[in-house]
Image: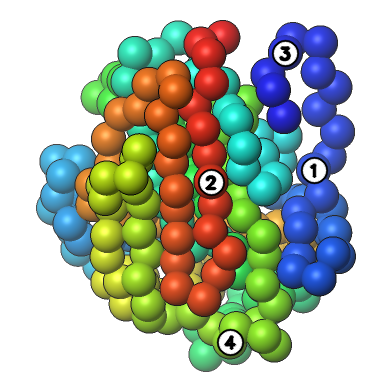
Amino acid sequence: MTYSLDNVWPTPLVEIQGGERVALGRIFCVGRNYEAHAREMGKDPDRDPPFFFTKWAETAVIGGGEIAYPAATENFHYEVELVALIGEPAFRVPANKALDCVRAYAVGLDMTRRDLQLKARGEGRPWDTGKNFEQSAPLGTFHRVSDVGHLDRGSIRLTVNGEVKQEADLSDMIWSVPEILHFLSELYPLRPGDIVMTGTPAGVGPVVPGDRLLATIDGLTSLDVTIGARI
């Protein structure tokens, strides 16, 4: 959707392969879940419990396409991520049962106003202005677990204008998907339609208007995004 102040932002419907659409609930995101990315962000990775932040459902851009370069930033970054769609209610679920609540997986982008995020982090403030803004969560087509299984290994990759910027394996996650869902479900009852973005590998960096991003994960439909004009 091309950005306009006149746009009405209805509740997005995520796409599941085969044509089904499901109302998007909440967007939960995991911070610094790949060791090399934690280090490039100036942090020492360890296995302290994962931490989370959120985006509005209205920040989703279903299927990719053009997104606007957002206001109030000069350092707009990409982050490619595996995204899990919740299909069953889950609250205080143990890790060994957590995958039972996952319905499908997709490729996603956690687009970030990095300068605002780092300023907030340095001041000990929440990351909302850096993470939660219009068109900051492009999402690809979801694939059912019954078709692709649970993804715990395989290439995760992002190119900008054909140049590889991020490349890792899903097995490089510090916290696995079931472990993430266990910790998250201790904090919030998860509901069908909620999605969980599971963290990004090293190689994050800036984009400018006109750049084309291609995000891929083995076994899933790729996500193609172009950076549009500045708001």
Tell us which disc is closer to us: 2 or 1. Answer: 2
Q: Residue 135 placed where, x, y %?
A: 61, 30
Tell me, for residue 135, which label it has, or none.
none
Q: Amino acid at mark 4?
A: Gly
Give me the C-alpha separation between circle 2 and circle 3: 21 Å
Q: Nearer the viewer, residue 70 or 117?
A: 70
Of the residues shown, which amino acid type is indicated by label 3? Ser
Q: Nearer the viewer, residue 123 or 118?
A: 118
Give the mark, 4 or 2, whose residue is nearer the N terminus.
Answer: 4
Q: Secondary structure at mark 3?
A: loop
* Residue at horizontal 62 percent and vertical 74 percent from the top: 92
For the residues marked 1 and 3, what is the alpha-carbon distance in whole angstroms? Answer: 16 Å
> Which is nearer the eye, 100 or 16?
16
Give the position of the C terminus as an image quadrant.
top right
Measured in 3D between alpha carbons, the distance from the residue under mark 2 to the one under mark 1, in whole angstroms, is: 18 Å
Task: Give the Cα separation between the discs numbered 4 and 1.
Answer: 25 Å
Judged left or right of residue 126, residue 44 is left
Quarter of the image that includes the N terminus: top right
State if disc 3 and disc 2 touch (CB < 8 Å): no
Outermost residue toward the front? Answer: 162
Which element is circle 2 on? strand
Vertical comparison of 226 with 97: above or below = above
Residue placed under numbered mark 4 in the picture = 149
Left or right of 146: which side holds 68? Answer: left
**Can you see residue 85?**
no
Residue at image mark 1: 12
Give residue 4's mark.
3
Residue 110 visible from this viewpoint: yes
Give the secondary structure at mark 4.
loop
Of mark 2 and mark 1, the one earlier in the sequence is 1
The answer to which of marks 4 and 3 sits earlier in the sequence is 3
